[in-house]
């Protein structure tokens, strides 16, 4: 490719079929995080590097993300048996990607990870990223479906994961809140706030998030009551 100011081409050897291919990556100075949403979704100014995180081999269809660890020996045999053989036709999404292409790339990575029986935490992170991509498209039903899946996987990874446990607990509570499961959200945030072993960072994040939610809820209720009162006044005047 000719020099492009936004992307560079990364040369990749496929871990599955061993063939070489090039795939676009966003140049590091071509994006900037301007905001982080409550479930840690980064909002970018300029290009979104999330779209290019998964490399998909155009020869065999194997999808690779840097967080994957089961990418050798017996796991590759499982991937070939359970994923590659099932794949209809490998696609070429190695150049400029739409959000839909990125969703496809993460769904393929998700299938590879499932075939290789990767850890629940990794599956949870993929599901969350797919949900974020649907959020960018404003497709709320699909976003919810993947938030549910992510929450399930985070739940499973509770037991096995000490490292990063606070982040997982926070995300579990946060996703519960987004999915309308208030009881579970309250339980999760309260646990983080009350536990003295939790770092100040996550205790503060949990407290702020829960207080903001409660505040928003209260103002919604007040507005609804005021609305009712106005209706009542209107009716009384009519009479
Ligand atoms: Zn390949």
Image (cartoon, rainbow, N blue to C red):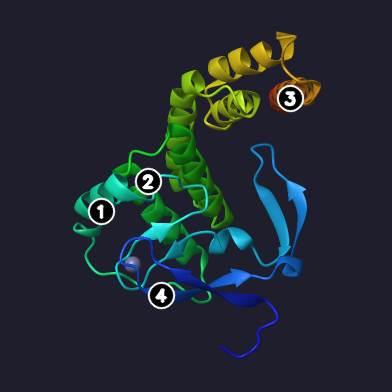
Residue 37 pos. (x, y %): 70, 42
Q: CA distance from mark 4 to mark 2?
A: 21 Å
Alpha-carbon neighbours of circle 2 within 10 Å: few (<14), some, or many (≥20)? many
Disc nearer the start of the sequence (2/1): 1
Disc nearer the start of the sequence (1/3): 1
Residue in the foreground of this view, choosing between 46 and 74: 74
> What SS does tag 2 mark?
helix
| Label 3 sits on residue | 202
Residue appearing at x 71%, y 58% in the figure: 44
Outermost residue, bottom side = 2
Residue appearing at x 34%, y 71% in the figure: 91
Disc nearer the start of the sequence (2/3): 2
Quadrant where ligand 1 appears: bottom left
Which label sits in the foreground, 3 or 4? 4
Disc nearer the start of the sequence (4/2): 4
| Label 4 sits on residue | 20
Residue 233 pos. (x, y %): 75, 23
Disc nearer the start of the sequence (1/4): 4
> What SS does tag 4 mark?
strand
Alpha-carbon neighbours of circle 4 within 10 Å: few (<14), some, or many (≥20)? few
Q: CA distance from mark 1 to mark 4?
A: 20 Å
| Label 1 sits on residue | 83
Residue appearing at x 54%, y 59% in the figure: 53
């Amino acid at each position: 490719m000719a020099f492009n100011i936004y992307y560079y081409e990364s040369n990749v050897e496929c871990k599955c079929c061993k063939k070489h291919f090039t795939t676009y990556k966003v140049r590091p100075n071509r994006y900037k995080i301007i905001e982080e949403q409550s479930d840690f979704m980064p909002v970018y100014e300029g290009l979104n590097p999330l779209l290019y995180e998964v490399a998909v081999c155009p020869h065999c269809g194997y999808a690779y993300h840097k967080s994957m660890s089961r990418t050798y020996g017996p796991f590759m045999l499982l991937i070939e048996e359970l994923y590659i053989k099932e794949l209809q036709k490998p696609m070429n999404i190695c150049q400029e990607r739409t959000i839909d292409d990125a969703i496809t790339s993460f769904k393929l990575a998700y299938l590879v990870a499932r075939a290789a029986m990767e850890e629940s935490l990794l599956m949870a992170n993929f599901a969350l990223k797919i949900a974020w991509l649907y959020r960018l498209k404003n497709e709320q039903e699909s976003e919810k479906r993947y938030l549910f899946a992510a929450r399930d996987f985070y739940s499973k990874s509770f037991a096995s994961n000490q490292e990063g446990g606070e982040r997982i607990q926070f995300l579990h509570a946060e996703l519960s809140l987004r999915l309308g499961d208030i009881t579970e959200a309250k339980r999760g945030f309260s646990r983080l706030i009350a536990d003295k072993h939790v770092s100040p960072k996550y205790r503060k994040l949990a407290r702020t998030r829960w207080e903001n939610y409660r505040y928003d809820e209260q103002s919604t209720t007040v507005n609804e009551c005021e609305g009712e009162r106005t209706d009542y006044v209107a009716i009384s005047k009519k009479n």
